[in-house]
Amino acid sequence: MDNDFKYHLQKYAGTRSRHICPSCGRKGEFTLYVDENNVPLNELVGRCNRESDCGYHYTPAQFFHDHPECKPQGEDWRKAPDWLKDHQPKPKPLCLVPPEIVARSVTHRSKSQFIRFLDTVFDPRIVEGLIDEYRLGTTRSGAVIFFQLDIQGRCRTGKMMLYDPETGHRIKDKDKPGRIDWVHSLMKRTGMLPQDWEVTQCLFGEHLLRLNPGKPVALVESEKTAVICAGLMPQYLWLATGGKSQLKAEKFAVLGSRKITAFPDVDGFTEWTQKLKAIPNLNVTIADVLQRSATPEDFAAQIDIADWLLRERLRPHGSDGQRHSRTFLDIQKYISPEAASEVEALIDELGLEFYGKVELIEDKSEE
């Protein structure tokens, strides 16, 4: 019997719904598995929200395997009785954030700390383009709002996060206000949304799929990474899952048969490979550029592809201690990162120079 069926991770209802993790001991980071009556299965059965730093996840299926004496007995409780079949509740309509909230938040005048960091990396025109494309919002406290807009342009929610404007690293100090929040949670707290409003997440950047039907998709974990990589490597359409826990088949259905290259964080390669390869009909290639090139310090810092690309772009010397050639720096944004070392070696060996780029148009006329 699949006893996982009747248990789900407890929905967030304030600090009382988040507990001490039995693995890392952090307060307010542990989510319990509960039944339909919101009763926890066991104090050890749940998931730590610190996916990269802790990773504890003890599922109901694992618990029942370890404790078979706790399995429910008798008739299969998963099956609804006959008299209830004709009285099943209709599915709730999709809950959405009003579009005017997005419109008011996206501005070039008031810059979030994350946008101020982008200003140190890119030309102002590129930054403005990224703001417009990804609909990057700004809060009064200077946090960036990563709105989740689905393929139809509807806003599912928005993640509000605070960044250091000099380093671009997320501020994780719990004592700082505005560290991380959700648009729908804030609106529910202030009475702008009803309390029974339920979030249904989508991929960050999903709305760009309709605008770029022929563009190959690059998939990363964090929203920040997607935005930075879009500025560095615009030949890809960069989307973000929002976390390792969001590698769910239903979120990728919108991609159809699109060609996808996934760039896991350096600490997530194995998990991404297992989860993405298990999704049927997903045309995905898992890039191992970080696995092949990361140093022990990189693994300790849990870098992602944006960290790696920025470092390769800004540091004056290559991995062999020699300066990057001008030619390589000129073409770096046009090539895939996993091919960078091979391309640079070819440039050095043949003494190639960069004279410009041209767009190749396939000739489909008959011979």
Image: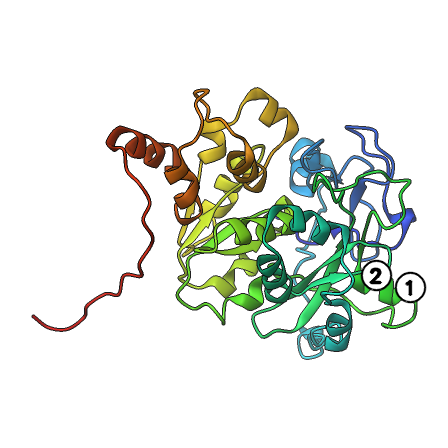
**Residue occupied by mark 2:** 185
The kind of residue on which mark 1 rests is Arg
Q: Is residue 303 above or below residue 13?
A: above
For residue 189, the mark is: 1
The reply to whether residue 51 is in sight is: yes
Q: Secondary structure at mark 2?
A: helix
The percent position of residue 320, horizontal first and vertical second, equals 43, 20
For residue 233, the mark is: none
Is there CB contact under 8 Å for labels 1 and 2? yes
Q: Is residue 7 above or below residue 188?
A: above
> Where is residue 96, by image quadrant?
bottom right
The percent position of residue 145, horizontal first and vertical second, equals 74, 59
The kind of residue on which mark 2 rests is Ser
Q: Secondary structure at mark 1?
A: helix
- Residue 191 shown left or right of residue 313 in the figure: right
Q: Is residue 207 above or below residue 160?
A: below
Who is closer to the viewer here, 146 or 37? Answer: 146
* Crowd rating for badge 1 (residues with CA inside 10 Å; few <14, some 14–19, many 20+): few
The reply to whether residue 3 is in sight is: no
Who is closer to the viewer here, 210 or 167? Answer: 167
* Crowd rating for badge 2 (residues with CA inside 10 Å; few <14, some 14–19, many 20+): many
Residue at (44% x, 64% y) in the render: 256
The percent position of residue 258, horizontal first and vertical second, equals 41, 61
